[in-house]
């Protein structure tokens, strides 16, 4: 097996300079970031190259998606497929090079930060247009923030990470003229600029949807740009626009002729005319299609690394290694003790187990992560114990770990009042057999393998796990309903801890281990916020207020200590970021944070010129 060394970003000085001067942002094509969940590229059994007739062949990049999008709405989405779509179709005020950390102008050509750090004035580029030809102005920026992201009637993860201080105030955003927008905050906020990279949306298209409500009294906006929307009605500002969507088959994007960016020679970007995604819920199929030559890229899963490495030269592709990937893989229990319409969200018997920290710690000790690394990840990773990515300068290398120790797990269970029967089954203090349902998204081979091992490992300490992979959209709906027992998932990540505040904010929209009622659902009564849960929330607020790097790191170190002790999430494996891309796609600058396509507007399909000469 090839030796792969992790690459770690640990230059706190470079990070601190960028943090203080520009306060590194959320940014459109660092696709590993956002809310919450990691996707592996997959492809259907049909050949994507044949999705477009040869007489219509143009320069294109063929990729794929593990699932259909849940919506085309950039505000209300919760899945990573839509995050990838946004990366192609929308831009914010700024962007970032994920390799160097350099902040780059995007829709804004420049910005000025006040001396006290409480105000940023952005100046937009002249002549910006929407894909329908209408001008993009400061009005669209103010509309996006004030009327969409800040709108409490609209569920949005962006709003959570924009909240500032203990009062969780939102920035004040106002238009100065057609090209200038002012952002003002009430107190120091380290990731200030981070919160200006969200996709800007068209006021002339979407404002009317805020003035109408459906029969249930919900804003029309919530059902706007759904999967049944004619794609020509989805107006964008990014390098590509949606051309075709066939559910469970494909998505096709075409270049946006009104995109603002040109290269150094004045040539219109993007270079590549079309992006094609095939949709299939099978990772092995993606590998088969990539090996056959019908797929231009593949996020490599560990079981195929050795095989693909041997075929690298013959297959005319390059395998890139970005070091340990950003993000987390974990499973968790539903800790919500509330009820809806008089019915508990979680069986009270099981809720007592889940809310017992010794039970969660015992489960953590019972999972053999090293066996996962060797058997499932083929050695291409390491055990994970923190919510902060290994490559982040805020990672705590001294965080508590849960090395495999089933005897210690059993001891903790006995201390917590559990007991064993003659068959070795674990019972609670009332004689109930300890058993729970664990869900994950079907078709994700790694998660299915991890879930199977978790079931086996916990059986060794007398716990029965009913492992049930289900369709992705079904899983998301179940999590949104808060009526589930446990789930195995993953979140994306980045260098800046505050980008995950929507997860650790006790009222955040992805605070999923103890979720409040989501918009459009019946209220939850009796929800309890634990002291440690509130402390994590408060520490994240303090961390965002502190501008000194060392002091910030100490705060986030403490959050990692509490989370490792209380285990709202039981972390599993941090894999290497490995991707393969055909050599005809030029020029790839791969990184763990941005993947292969973060600069997709500058990538070229060099095979097209030779194809057209035949």
Image (spheres, helix red, strand yellow):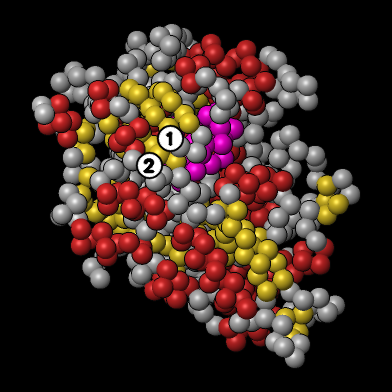
What secondary structure prevails in the magenta region? loop
In this rendering, would 401 be left or right of 305?
right
Q: Give the range drawn in magenta.
A: 64-86
Numbered label attached to residue 380: none
Mark 1 element type: strand
Residue drawn at point x = 81 percent, y = 67 percent: 349
Asked if one can make out residue 579 in the rendered structure from this viewpoint, the answer is yes
C-alpha distance separating marks 1 and 2: 10 Å
Left of 513 or right of it: where is 276? left
Residue 400 place in picture, x, y as percent: 52, 71
Is the residue 204 above or below the residue 534 in the image?
above
Question: How dense is the environment of label 1, judged by Cα within 10 Å: few (below 14), some, or many (20 and up)?
Answer: many
**Mark 2: which secondary structure?**
loop
Q: In this view, does 174 lie above or below 366?
A: above
Residue 527 placed where, x, y %? 79, 51
- Please tell me in which quadrant of the rendered image residue 383 appears: bottom left
Quarter that holds the N terminus:
bottom left
Q: Mark 1 points at which residue?
A: 250
Foreground: 273 or 22? 273
Q: Is 148 part of what is drawn in magenta?
A: no
Residue at image coords 48%, 73%:
369
Instruction: Check the image and report above or below for 368 versus 56.
Output: below
The residue pinned by badge 2 equals 46
Tell me where residue 382 sits by quadrant: bottom left
Residue 532, percent across and down? 67, 60
- Magenta stretch: includes residue 82: yes
């Amino acid at each position: 097996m090839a030796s792969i060394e992790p690459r770690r970003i640990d230059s706190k000085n470079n990070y601190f300079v960028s943090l203080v001067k520009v306060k590194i942002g959320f940014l459109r094509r660092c696709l590993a970031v956002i809310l919450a969940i990691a996707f592996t590229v997959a492809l259907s059994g049909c050949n994507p190259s044949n999705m477009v007739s040869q007489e219509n062949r143009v320069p294109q990049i063929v990729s794929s998606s593990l699932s259909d999008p849940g919506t085309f709405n950039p505000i209300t989405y919760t899945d990573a497929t839509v995050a990838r779509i946004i990366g192609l179709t929308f831009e914010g005020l700024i962007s970032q090079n994920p390799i160097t950390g350099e902040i780059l102008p995007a829709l804004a050509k420049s910005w000025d930060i006040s001396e006290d750090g409480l105000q940023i004035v952005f100046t937009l580029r002249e002549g910006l247009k929407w894909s329908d030809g209408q001008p993009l102005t400061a009005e669209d920026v103010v509309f996006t923030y004030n009327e969409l992201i800040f709108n409490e009637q609209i569920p949005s993860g962006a709003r959570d990470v924009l909240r500032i201080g203990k009062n969780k105030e939102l920035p004040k955003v106002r238009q100065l003229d057609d090209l200038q927008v002012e952002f003002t905050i009430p107190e120091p906020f380290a990731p200030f600029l981070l919160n200006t990279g969200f996709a800007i949306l068209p006021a002339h298209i979407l404002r009317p949807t805020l003035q109408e409500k459906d029969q249930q009294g919900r804003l029309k906006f919530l059902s706007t740009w759904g999967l049944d929307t004619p794609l020509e009605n989805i107006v964008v500002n990014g390098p590509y626009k949606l051309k075709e969507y066939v559910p469970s088959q494909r998505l096709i994007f075409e270049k946006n002729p009104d995109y603002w960016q040109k290269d150094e020679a004045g040539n219109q970007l993007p270079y590549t005319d079309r992006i094609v995604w095939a949709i299939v819920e099978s990772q092995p199929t993606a590998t088969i299609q990539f090996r056959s030559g019908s797929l231009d890229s593949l996020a490599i899963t560990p079981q195929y690394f050795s095989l693909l490495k041997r075929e690298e030269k013959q297959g005319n592709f390059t395998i890139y290694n970005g070091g340990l990937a950003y993000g987390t893989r974990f499973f968790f229990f539903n800790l919500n003790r509330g009820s809806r319409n008089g019915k508990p969200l979680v069986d009270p018997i099981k809720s007592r187990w889940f809310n017992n920290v010794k039970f969660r710690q015992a489960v953590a000790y019972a999972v053999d992560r090293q066996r996962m690394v060797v058997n499932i990840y083929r050695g291409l990773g390491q055990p994970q114990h923190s919510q902060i990515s290994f490559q982040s300068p805020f990672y705590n290398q001294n965080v508590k770990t849960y090395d495999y120790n089933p005897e210690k797990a059993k001891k903790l269970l006995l201390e917590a009042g559990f007991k064993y029967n003659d068959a070795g089954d674990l019972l609670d203090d009332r004689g109930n057999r300890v058993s729970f349902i664990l869900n994950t998204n079907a078709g994700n081979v790694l998660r299915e393998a991890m879930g199977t091992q978790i079931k086996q490992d916990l059986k060794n300490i007398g716990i029965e796990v009913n492992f049930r992979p289900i369709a992705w959209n079904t899983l998301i709906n179940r999590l949104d309903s808060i009526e589930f027992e446990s789930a195995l998932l993953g979140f994306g990540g980045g260098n800046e801890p505050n980008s995950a505040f929507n997860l650790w904010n006790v009222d955040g929209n992805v605070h999923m281990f103890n979720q409040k009622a989501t918009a459009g659902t019946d209220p939850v009564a009796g929800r309890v916020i634990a002291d440690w849960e509130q402390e994590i929330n408060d520490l994240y607020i303090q961390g965002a207020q502190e501008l000194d790097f060392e002091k910030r790191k100490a705060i986030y170190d403490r959050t990692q200590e509490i989370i490792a002790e209380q285990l709202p999430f039981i972390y599993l494996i941090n894999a290497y970021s490995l991707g393969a891309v055909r050599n005809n796609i030029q020029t790839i600058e791969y990184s763990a944070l941005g993947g292969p396509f973060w600069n997709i507007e500058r990538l070229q399909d060099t095979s097209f010129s030779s194809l057209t000469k035949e």
